[in-house]
Amino acid sequence: MISLPKYLSQLISKGALKTMPALLEKIQVTPERNKDWDYTSPSAIKIYNMTKKSGSFGFPTCQELANAVVANIEPENPAIEKIELKQAGQGDPSKAGFFLNITLKNEFIENEVMKLLKVQHLSVEEEEKKERQRVVVDFSSPNIAKNMHVGHLRSTIQGDSICRVLEFMGYDVLRTNHLGDWGTQFGMLIAELDDKFPDLINQDVDLGDLQVFYKSARKRFDTDDEFKKRSQENVVKLQSGDEHCMVSWKFLCDISRLEFQKIYERLDIKIEERGESFYNPLLKPLVEELEARGFTKDDKGAKCIFIPKQKVPLMVQKSDGGFNYDTTDIAALRYRIEEQKGDWLIYITDSGQELHFKLLFEGGKLIGIYDPAKTRIDHMGFGLVLQESEEEVKQEDSKEEEKKGEEKKGGEKKKKIEKMKSRDGDTVKLQSLLDEAKARALKIFTERLHEQDANHEESKGQQSKVQVQESDLEQTAEILGISSIKYYDLKQNRIQNYVFSFDKMLDPKGNTGVYLQYAYVRVLSIMRKANYSPEQLEEILQNERFVITHKRERELALSLLRLPEQIDLTLSELQVNRITELLYEIAVKISEFYSECKVIGSPEEKSRILLLEATRKTMKQVFTLLGMQTIERI
Ligand SMILES: NC(=[NH2+])NCCC[C@H](N)C(=O)O
């Protein structure tokens, strides 16, 4: 597939270069939706302003310049039907800027759709492929002995989708789980383990809820001096590789790992573990080196790297001699650049860690391990997941609360928007969140089945069709529930906070996973009704052609061809919502197409089946890029 803006930009740039041989810049082209033309280029204004300054090209007005560019565009090019000049704003045309509005040839759109149909798998053009580029994507990264919380869920969903898009573009992607599997918290966990299960290896140990275990250790650490001392000793022992401590540590990691793995399986996530502990052996020599090279300063006994213009330093060694999150991240940064040879590093966490990463990247430059000219590094930060809850309020509090601007008062109860947590104030358990999504999806889906069934009986007077197998229902509900959670997250502008709402996520009529799954199923069901065997479909594909006869066919086809440009945007902005936007656009175009274009039994049947097949293929690819499994029938 080709990116149409890029392709058109090349065509127009060639024309512009003929008009002005000294032109250095490429002409930008962007898509336009719901207009009489398909793409637009505001560059005529830009070039004109550039040339006016140098006074070298002799076009007295932007209009004349734009006309000359248009006249110089290859007349035999296969894509452009017409280019119209459109004045920017009203007023005197001799002083105004002009846009170039581009309409594509129907034949070109038809050919591109046919190309899409003929390849086995959608992929990008060879020259667009980024095979030699390696990207290290650090995502998910939960912490051992703690629950994976909704922040980790966001990182997991967003990270997986970005990896899928990068892989589609041919990048060599290292999906990296920077697991929080090291650090001082293990001192107390090991002490707690020693007390509760003194004979760990020979005992049959069931820790139960790891979060509860963690809390009880924490409580003892805060209140019991003997326990605290033992915990601190354990940290030192663990760091120096003490055998007993290592066994306990590994035991704890394994339990957490199993829990995380269950979530990854349900979410269909592939990720490789390279936790913090991996970098442990590198930390001491790293700090010694930084000290020897004069990068560290003593700050109340701690060793720090101060970065110009930043108030907070990176702390590489605490006053008690221990290393921390910063030290590990510097070691990991170096490892990813120097050992893993990453050309591009992406870190996906909530925006609360923005400062940490800013310091890390600046620090990396300062100490000479990161050169922005050679490596692209992004922190892909995201907003919080919030929840809306209703809360009884005492009248006298309400004024105060309202001032904060977070809450809306409503009689005795008020709505409160806050960080997502469970009823007892803990982090929400992801498994139960996924279970609830599934249960709700099951309800919605069963209702839909009954609705369909009722319609069916009315129209045909036939027997009940609701005979879907129990196991199929379960599976469908799981797919609907999980893909809707994913879609709702991915469609957000990642930087903003969002309110988690099952009702909104699963609304069959909104811009939701459920709506899109239904749209997809509808395409499949029309194809099924048309009742072509695979061989017949193949024959149509080989011998027939998609021909545009209706506005709605053209619009749908053009949306399908927009995948590459949305991918480009996704990767430059690191916003997956560029892809969800496209999926929604396709779904809307399909329903417009259905309402105005008959498929089965129409003279255009074969051409329209080809369009639907191209739609099915593109949608399936887009679902895959978003990490959403699909249902095939209702
Ligand atoms: N290289 C990194 N710092 N990656 C992100 C780690 C996220 C961390 N474990 C947390 O839960 O907040």
Image: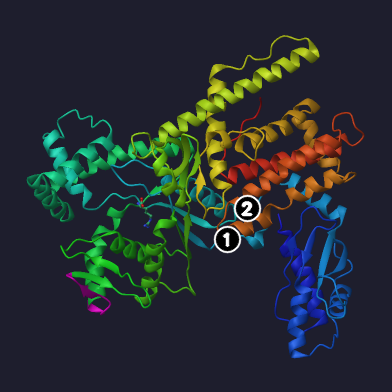
Give x and y (percent) for residue 60. 86, 86
Please state which of residues 384 and 269 is positioned toward the viewer in this rendering: 384
Please state which of residues 518 and 138 is positioned toward the viewer in this rendering: 518
Give x and y (percent) for residue 154. 47, 46
Main SS, magenta region, reads loop
Give x and y (percent) for residue 407. 47, 45
Give the Cα separation between the discs numbered 2 and 1.
9 Å
In magenta stretch: residue 358: no
Where disc 1 sits, the SS reads: helix
Residue 531 in sight: no
Residue 175 in sight: yes
Task: Report which residue position mark 2 lands on.
Answer: 578
Task: Report which residue position mark 1 lands on.
Answer: 573
Q: Quadrant of ligand 1?
A: bottom left
Question: How would you rate the neighbour count of disc 1 (Cα within 10 Å): few for under 14, some for 14-19, many for 20 or more?
Answer: few
Magenta residues (range): 292-301
Q: Residue at x 26, y 60 (%)?
A: 324
Which amino acid type corresponds to the residue marked 1 in the rendered image?
A: Glu
Q: Earlier in the sequence, mark 2 or mark 1?
A: 1
Image vertical order of residue 22 relative to residue 84, above or below: below
Which quadrant, please, contains the C terminus? top right
In magenta stretch: residue 294: yes
- Looking at the image, residue 128 sits to the left or right of residue 229; the answer is right
